[in-house]
Amino acid sequence: MTSAMGVRAWLSRYAPAEAAGITGALLATAPLDEPGAAAVAGTVGETIGFYAMIFARDVRAGGRPAAVVRDMVLEFGPAELLDTLLVRPGAMYLASRALGTTATGVVVGKLAADVVFYAVAIIGYELRRVRVAASKDLTASPPPD
């Protein structure tokens, strides 16, 4: 899905979680001046904020917590492994070192890492969306004769 409707759906899903993630990253790095510690703390803070928002919204929308977690793993699992273990801390560290300030480096590194993250996560989102649509087709009543 690459239409304007697809982009709107992605923004609707991810923008509030991004705001929560940035808040988490900044809160986690506020007391830190060392780029390495800030990269790790920023990654953890962002992860907690981002997924807490996704989980809360999906449960509020009627999802059962176990099903929401399963769907989150499908949507975000591969992207998260690559992102958290390599791309995001590296980008935050390099940006903090290059820019000389932890807070600015965390935000710039986060934005750079997001490009990689969403390139993978959107594939998971679309696979999840197709799976949900297929399951609805299978459970729908047959059309009248």
Image (spheres, rainbow, N blue to C red):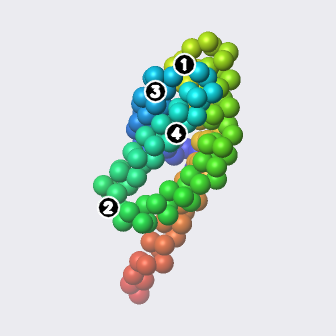
- The residue under label 1 is 33
Counting residues from the start of the chain, the first of labels 4 and 3 encountered is: 3
Instruction: Name the mark on residue 44.
Output: 4
Number of the front mark, 3 or 1: 1
- The residue under label 2 is 62
Q: Residue 97, position in %: x, y?
A: 66, 18
Crowd rating for badge 2 (residues with CA inside 10 Å; few <14, some 14–19, many 20+):
few
| Mark 1 element type | loop
Crowd rating for badge 4 (residues with CA inside 10 Å; few <14, some 14–19, many 20+):
some
Q: Residue 91, position in %: x, y?
A: 66, 29
Q: CA distance from mark 3 to mark 1?
A: 12 Å
Crowd rating for badge 1 (residues with CA inside 10 Å; few <14, some 14–19, many 20+):
some
Instruction: Name the mark on residue 26.
Output: 3
Q: Amino acid at mark 3?
A: Leu
Counting residues from the start of the chain, the first of labels 2 and 4 encountered is: 4
Counting residues from the start of the chain, the first of labels 1 and 2 encountered is: 1
Counting residues from the start of the chain, the first of labels 2 and 3 encountered is: 3
